[in-house]
Amino acid sequence: MGSLGKDEQYLDIVRDVYAQAATTPQPKLCCTTAPIWQLPGLKVPTVMQEMNYGCGTTVHPADIGSDDTILYVGVGGGMEVLQLAYFARRPGGVIAVDAVGAMLEKAQANLQVAAEENSWFEPGFVSLREGDALALPVPDISVDLAAQNCLFNVFTREHLDRALSEMYRVLKPRGRLSLSDPIATRPIPAHLAADPRLRAECLSGALTYEEYMAAIVRAGFGTVEVRARVPYRVLDRERYGLDKHLLLESVEVVAIKDPMPEDGPCVFTGRTAIYFGPEEVFDDGKGHLLSRDLPLSVCDKTAEALQRLESPHFLVTGSTFHYRGGGSC
């Protein structure tokens, strides 16, 4: 990235932390909240499991198409790119980018181990590239699925906007961006947000849920799906100089490169509408057909519009922050 300004110097510390993690596994660097994939014929080497630096599930197998070109940013020990290569079994089917040379070298070595333990896998299935999330070494409109796990939360807000814009740039129309990051249940105090080591350790760079979602929308994604939102860590008042404990959560989001609707993005947070009126089907005149007695997943805009009808024949649930598709916006 060239010379760093004052506001960018934290990136040096982030890279130092992960360079150390490349040579010596750091089990407390992140707190993974999801199990390793259990798939027929897939064996994840122990050395990869020891370097599993993440905060949730980045990509679900159901989101991966058979011909997808997949981009993964922040390689770590290579576990996630191995899992993705299970589906993209062709040369360069997975592009893996990392800014830390030592981490790329370790990932390359780990992928060689994976090839010895998995008869189906060839290291050439993964194209390892040294590069920056703020300037991806990937052509425009060339990727079907992009993903990152517990990386974007270390960025400042300006850099987060740049990283999201880069992901948007490389995605094809209708391409998907899968994200997993810590978020904060209230704003991170300034004395913690300014600590670059805590930021590198995925503790003090977290935005609130509202701020995080707003950043995704600013990048241009017209559809955003919240797949999960669960407890991650606690910043306790004694160790972190707080007036009260601060809960961090892990949020999993899929953002789709759809055109932005005139009335704003379609954001799915697990809300459901059920119609139980006298007609077999209710038509709201905006493209939503609700069959009587059958629940329909709806985006937040549609849920709020149906609630404004004040009809006695609707039940509209609140956000569960758990959505798996099939809804209507």
Image (tube, rainbow, N blue to C red):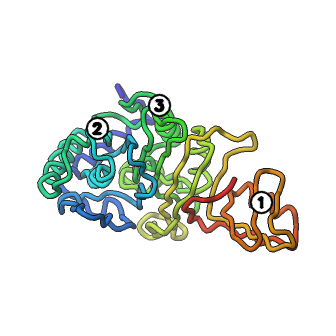
Of label 1 and label 2, which has the lower sequence position? 2
**Dot 3 lies on which element?**
loop
Horizontal side of 137 relative to 244 (left or right) equals left
The span from disc 1 to disc 2 (Cα, nearest Å) is: 44 Å
Which is nearer the eye, 292 or 275?
Answer: 292
**Dot 2 lies on which element?**
loop
Where residue 206 sits: x, y (%)?
49, 54
The span from disc 2 to disc 3 (Cα, nearest Å) is: 16 Å
Quadrant of the rendered image containing residue 259: top right
**Dot 1 lies on which element?**
helix
Q: Residue at x 52, y 64 (%)?
A: 229
Can you say whether 73 is above or below 204 in the image?
above
Horizontal side of 45 relative to 221 (left or right) equals left
Q: Residue at x 42, y 30 (%)?
A: 5
Say which residue label 3 marks. Answer: 141
Of label 1 and label 3, which has the lower sequence position? 3
User: Mark 3 and mark 2 in contact (Cβ < 8 Å)?
Assistant: no
Disc marking residue 304: 1
**10 Å crowding of disc 2: few (<14), some (14-19), many (20+):** some
Disc marking residue 92: 2
Of label 2 and label 3, which has the lower sequence position? 2
Q: Residue at x 54, y 41 (%)?
A: 174
